[in-house]
């Protein structure tokens, strides 16, 4: 059986299965780990560039786009020091309501 046919068969046999969403805590932990891994290889994309490309920034990331701060600060990962990350990774249905915050989206989306 070819790979394509095998995957089609698998999809057909699981079509009646109810899919559960991953817990928000797990999504938060995975997101944190992925961003930390990206930061290990060098500075992250400058937040001003993210905003210019249409990316959503949370209120704290927006504050870091002030031109006086410089590129080193605006390309860091502010989520590492944000209490939303701590709540998001440790609490299900965390009360995080900041627009543009990925942790808020995991818990309220």
Image (cartoon, rainbow, N blue to C red):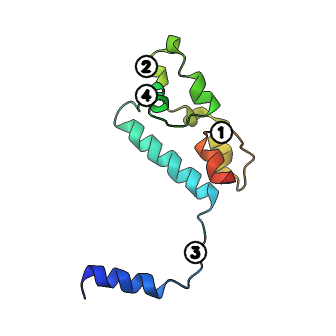
Position of the C terminus, as image quadrant, is bottom right
Q: Earlier in the sequence, mark 3 or mark 2?
A: 3
Q: Earlier in the sequence, mark 2 or mark 1?
A: 2
Residue 96 picture location, percent across and down: 71, 44
60 vs 65, left or right, is: right
Q: 32 above or below 21?
A: above
Residue nearest the observer in this picture, 20 or 41:
20
CA distance for labels 2 and 4: 11 Å
CA distance for labels 3 and 1: 27 Å
Q: Earlier in the sequence, mark 4 or mark 3?
A: 3
CA distance for labels 4 and 3: 36 Å
Mark 4–mark 3 CB contact (< 8 Å): no
7 vs 27, left or right, is: left
Question: Which residue, given by chain and number where applicable, does mark 4 sit on?
Answer: 49
The structure residue drawn at horizontal position 56% and vertical position 55%, both measured from the top left corner, is 27
Question: Which residue, given by chain and number where applicable, does mark 1 sit on?
Answer: 99
Residue 86 quadrant: top right
Q: 1 above or below 48?
A: below
Q: 59 above or below 30?
A: above
Question: Which residue, given by chain and number where applicable, does mark 2 sit on?
Answer: 71
Residue 68 picture location, percent across and down: 51, 10
Q: Considering the numbered disc 1 on the image, is that residue within a helix, a strand or a loop?
A: loop
Number of residues whose C-alpha sits closer than 10 Å to that of mark 1, classed few (under 14), some (14–19) or many (20 or more): few
Q: Considering the numbered disc 4 on the image, is that residue within a helix, a strand or a loop?
A: helix
Q: Nearer the viewer, mark 3 or mark 2?
A: 3
The structure residue drawn at horizontal position 58% and vertical position 51%, both measured from the top left corner, is 28
Q: Earlier in the sequence, mark 1 or mark 4?
A: 4
42 vs 103, left or right, is: left
Question: Which residue, given by chain and number where applicable, does mark 3 sit on?
Answer: 19
Q: Which of marks 2 and 4 is nearer the N terminus?
A: 4
């Amino acid at each position: 059986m070819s790979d394509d046919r095998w995957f089609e068969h698998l999809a057909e046999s699981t079509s009646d299965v109810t899919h559960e969403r991953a817990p928000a805590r797990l999504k938060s932990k995975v997101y944190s780990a992925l961003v930390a891994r990206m930061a290990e290889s060098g500075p992250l994309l400058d937040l001003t560039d993210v905003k210019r490309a249409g990316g959503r920034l949370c209120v704290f990331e927006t504050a870091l786009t002030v031109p006086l701060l410089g590129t080193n600060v605006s390309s860091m990962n502010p989520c590492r020091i944000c209490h939303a990350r701590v709540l998001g990774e440790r609490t299900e249905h965390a009360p995080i309501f900041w627009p543009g915050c990925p942790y808020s989206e995991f818990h309220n989306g």
